[in-house]
Image (cartoon, rainbow, N blue to C red):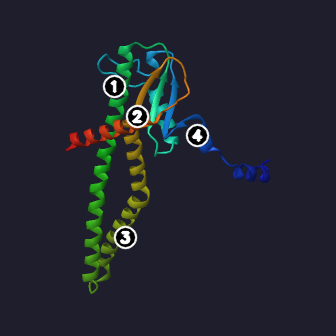
Amino acid sequence: MINCKTIKLFESRKGNFDDRLKKDYLRNGIVTFPCHISDYNDVISTYSVKGYETLSTEFSDNLKTSVELLPPEYPVVLNIIGDCLSAEEKKIITDTIQDTFAYELGAVEKEEKRHTKVFIFMIVGLILSGILLYFTHTVADEPRELFYVLFWFMGETLCDYIFLTGYDLRHNRRMAGRLASIKVAFSDKYKEPNYTESDVDRLYSEIEKDVRESRQEEE
């Protein structure tokens, strides 16, 4: 039998997200996500062909889920921990992570452009249907009902885009951009992150440089 008092206790429970973030991840304005591996294929899919490497699904999903939970205003450093990697494997992992998330960012940008076109079309349709309603007030009810339907459909779609779909698109855009800007570091064993001011400045400068270069390529 369900105890209502117990349910209310669960509902009133408070989390400690900020404390956990500061204790485990955040150091001097940088979020470090540690990831322990025991083998090269923990990161790179066993189905990959040399020169066409892809990320392991488990690794990729774990990274995305973890970054999703972290506040969006902090850059992320992925610290891959393990003494099982050669210099060549480290380079392949770094390049594959960057290429994979840059590709996913491109896919999000395409989806965003498509929705922008739909958004513009809906605005034009809303204006035109409103004009038709205004200038056909003397027309019989049957034709005007069609204009009413078009007007409310366009309006409802716009509201959905602005308050629901648009929010999801912006969120996905931020996430994709953040993952595409992730910095990869390697260490043989876990060490407590300790970023100096110069480390922070260098990381932000690298991210700004990457963003500028990506925008120039787009242009």
Alpha carbon distance from label 1 to label 2:
11 Å
- Give amino acid for label 3: Trp
Local SS, label 1: helix
Q: Earlier in the sequence, mark 3 or mark 4?
A: 4
**Is mark 3 in CB contact (under 8 Å) with mark 4?**
no
From the viewer's perspective, is residue 173 above or below residue 203? below
Q: Quadrant of residue 176?
A: top left
Quarter of the C terminus within the rendering: top left
Local SS, label 3: helix
Q: Which residue is mark 1?
A: 95
Q: Which residue is mark 4?
A: 22
Q: Residue at x 27, y 42 (%)?
A: 212
- Give amino acid for label 2: Ile
**For the residues carrying marks 2 and 3, which lies nearer the camera in this image?**
2
Q: Which residue is mark 2?
A: 182
Q: Residue 101 in the image: x percent, y percent?
A: 36, 34
Taking the image as shown, residue 135 lies to the left or right of residue 91, namely left
- Give amino acid for label 1: Asp
Q: Which mark is residue 152?
A: 3
Taking the image as shown, residue 76 lies to the left or right of residue 147, namely right
Q: Which mark is residue 70?
A: none
Q: Earlier in the sequence, mark 3 or mark 1?
A: 1
Alpha carbon distance from label 3 to label 4:
47 Å
Residue furthest bottom as drawn: 138
Q: Residue 210 in the image: x percent, y percent?
A: 31, 37
